[in-house]
Amino acid sequence: MYRTAAKRLLAGGGITTTRLLRLPKLRSTIIPSSYTSGLCTSSIGGNTESPMGNQSVNPNQSGPTASSSTGTGEGQRRHESRKPRAEFQEEQARVLSASLRHVPRLGWTEEAMMAGSRDVGVSPSIVGSFSRKEAALVEFFMDECLQLLMDRIDSGLDLQNLIPSERISKLIRIRLEMQVPYMSKWPQALSIQAHPLNVPTSFKQRAMLVDEIWHAVGDGASDLDWYVKRTILGGVYSTTEIYMLTDDSLEHRDTWAFLDDRVKDAFDLKKSIQEAKYFAEDIGAGVGKSVQGLMNGVMQTMSRRSGGSAF
Amino acid sequence: MALRTVSRRLGSRILNHRSFVASLHSHATSFGFQEVKEEEKSKLVGNVFTNVASSYDIMNDVMSGGLHRLWKERLVGKLSPFAGMKHLDVAGGTGDVAFRIYDAVYSVKRRALQKVDEASLEETQIYVCDINPNMLNVGKQRAAERGLRDNKSLVWVEGDAEALSFDDNSMDGYTIAFGIRNVTHIEKALAEAYRVLKRGGRFLCLELSHVEIPIFKNLYDLYSFQVIPNLGELIAGDRESYQYLVESVRRFPPQERFASMIADAGFEKVEYENLVGGVVAIHSAIKL
């Protein structure tokens, strides 16, 4: 169920799907005649319906002195402007995408984003308007990676011949390899994601990622198991990610070995839990029987005694 | 004083020209609660600020209980100034906002945290534009007090918000704090702001705005109309100017309407944030 939501979310802002963004703009240029006096809070199609998940967070997290209320409006021009008006979300995506190149050198910081904005040909001031600045960059990257992962899965990744645990390993490996170019600065990204203001979004992104992986592995459970599976996989993913931070081996061989072990543990854990359940049942049964036997014996003895001692 | 005579003359002019009411209204604008001719407004506003220039900062502190500092901090925080930026502060006569931006860019703490290129630091230009030379003089004086008299980064320019003397696409940021309601044609000022900003440049406007919260609104009105003019008389010796001030606040378009005016000028991502329940609003937008 996350998958369709994810597709909608990412289609709105992903750099690969530009078609969806073009369409609303076409609508907007046709509409002007039906509006009066320039006041138009136009929901320019894509913007309000499919917000770019994290970036469209309203600046409502302001200090205690400010009771903030936001209003957004985009004016409709009566006359068509000569150059096509780039929408803010598009522009933001372009700047963030260009900024990623500077991350290995400058980190997940405003400097990287300002350098990115210069590459795109926009004033660095625009960075000041991104909500939760560095987090915007990190979240953009996470979304992009998820999109890439989904693309790879869709383009026919060979998962059929593998058993579930191997499938999971492979998928996590693919995903983590996307982070390799940024490995030197990844701890910073993790700390940004752990910041209280950013936790809701980063948690959601990880949940989507984990859900996507299970979906690809072919899981269809929808009961309590669903949460357990995702929690465990989330744990495996996070621990591997953190292990990778300090892994110096060639091509991160140690990390993949670690990953395989953890996945095995997880599946073993599942088996162990089941075995423990059966074991408990058996013991319960056994104890039950022996308690019953005991009670019977006691009753018999008592009745004999009472029978016998009745003078 | 000067203001009183002007308004008296104006009153008589309006009485004499009742037959020309039609033509007067077609080119009339508001000066507080009075209707005045457009050409008059800038002169009248000029007189107001000439009179208040010397006590402007003190009166700000008294009227807002020192809160105006917090509002300006918030404005500059939203702007996120960076080294090497070209910034224009319009109607920023006494330099409050400009100094804060300067400090933000040059602060040692910030330079330590971020790898700031010294060369780009030198390129920072903060232009302070004001139509009233008296206000600019007060600003220059304050700059001298801070040791920034000959600093290349701060440039004091006399100019009109409706007809800026800067090039197109030359500014990274544009702020106007408590100035736009004094402008005769707000749309022109917004158009000029759009013109001078670069692509990606930000427009930020801090202005007294409308309060809608029921009881608070009444208290605020009471404070505005009863207390402030008296304070003006007491401290600055000028009741009319402050009467004009509170009236002009009421005449200024409410938050949503102003936001749509900004959008009409071509800006994107127009947002506003109310502070103190709407007493003050910060409108922000981007030129794309």
Image: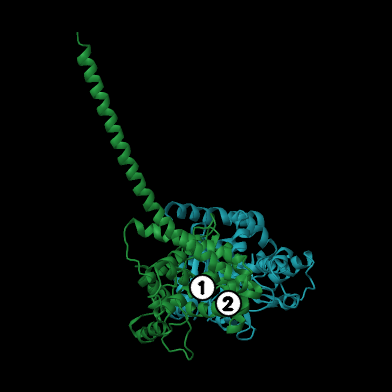
Chain colours: A green, B cyan
> Compared to A232, does A12 lie above or below?
below
Q: In x, y percent, where is residue A239?
A: 53, 61
The residue under label 1 is A140
**Mark 2 near mark 1, Cβ–Cβ under 8 Å?**
yes
Identity of the residue drawn at 49% across and 90% down: A83
In the image: residue A34, left or right of residue B136: left
- Mark 2 chain: A
Q: Quadrant of the C terminus of chain A?
A: top left
- Mark 1 chain: A
Farthest residue to the top: give it. A311
Is there any visible trace of residue B33 in the rendered image? no
Q: Quarter-wise, where is residue A256 in the image?
A: bottom right
> Compared to A300, does A189 lie above or below?
below
Q: In x, y percent, where is residue A113?
A: 60, 75
Farthest residue to the bottom: give it. A82
Q: Quadrant of the N terminus of chain A?
A: bottom left
Amino acid at dot 2: Leu
Indicate the secondary structure of the residue bearing disc 1: helix
The residue under label 2 is A100
Q: In x, y percent, where is residue A63?
A: 54, 57
Is there any visible trace of residue B214 in the rendered image? yes
Q: Quarter-wise, where is residue B103 in the image?
A: bottom right
- Seen from the viewer's position, the closer of residues A279 and B272 is A279
Identity of the residue drawn at 24% across and 16% down: A305
In the image: residue A268, left or right of residue B150: left
Amino acid at dot 1: Phe
- Seen from the viewer's position, the closer of residues B155 and A129 is A129
Mark earlier in primary sequence (2, 1): 2
